[in-house]
Amino acid sequence: MATEDLATRKKNNTEAKERQFKGLSLTERKELRREKLIEAGIATYGTHGFFSVTVKDVCNEAKLTERYFYESFKKSEELFQTVFLKMIGKMQHCLTQAVLMAAPEPKNMVNAGLSALLNAIKDDPRMARIIYIDAMLVQDLHNQATIQETLTQFDRIIQAFVMITMPNAPQSAEEVSLIATGLNGYVTHIIIRWVSESFKQPLEDVLSACCAVFLSFIETTSQKN
């Protein structure tokens, strides 16, 4: 019991020492600084582009010194990867929620999902630049398979959509997987062009082009059943 009390007192003393600055522990302060750097990364990379932004630029945006940058990240590429994955997570959530809300009619689900995706990109050009321009050029994301893993995640979302909405489709699971990759690539390249041209084409036209191949696949598959 005495040993337990001693251990408890030591733990409490350690926590008390940590909570010496604005009521936050050292761990909490580090996490807060890390989040500030991530938000600063979104702002700077998304506005000026990864290759035009230095560690100092990020730190100035976050209002932190450079030593705090290296407390959380080894180099700029590591922060960029964190920012990229955060943006991808936000995008996937937006797309998935829209598709679920439009269920169960397949055509409505396609239109809702792609509409949500395109609106999210246009509403936040920072997301567009980070995901569809710079991410394709940052070698670390390719070396660590981050880009490939992300594309695979979207492939699986599309594959799940096909399997759920068209359970009697004549294609095998392997063939549906290939089709999902093709559909993903089709939409991705349209979006890259749209983003690269600074959203010159109306969103409605881009949406129609993205939907076309999905709707064609749904129509063709329905005729075979």
Image (cartoon, rainbow, N blue to C red):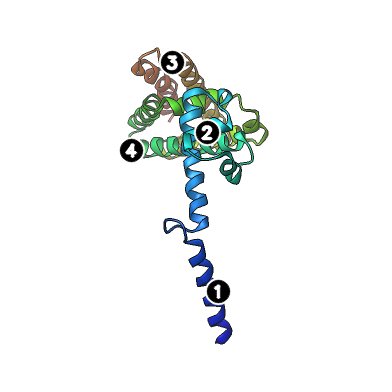
For label 2, the residue is: 58
Sequence-earlier tag: 2 or 1: 1
Task: Kindly identify the amino acid type of the residue bearing the numbered disc 3.
Answer: Ser
Task: Kindly identify the amino acid type of the residue bearing the numbered disc 4.
Answer: Ala
> Residue 181 placed where, x, y %?
55, 29
Badge 2 vs badge 3, beta-carbon distance below 8 Å: no
In the rendered structure, find residue 198 and report the number of the disc placed on it: 3
> Residue 5 placed where, x, y %?
53, 82
Q: What is the crowding at mark 3: few (fewer than 14 residues within 10 Å), some, or many (at least 20)?
A: few
Sequence-earlier tag: 4 or 3: 4
The span from disc 4 to disc 3 (Cα, nearest Å) is 32 Å
Sequence-earlier tag: 2 or 4: 2
- Residue 18, above or below 90: below
- Residue 101, above or below 32: above
| Residue drawn at the location 46% of the way across and 21% of the way down | 191
Q: What is the crowding at mark 1: few (fewer than 14 residues within 10 Å), some, or many (at least 20)?
A: few
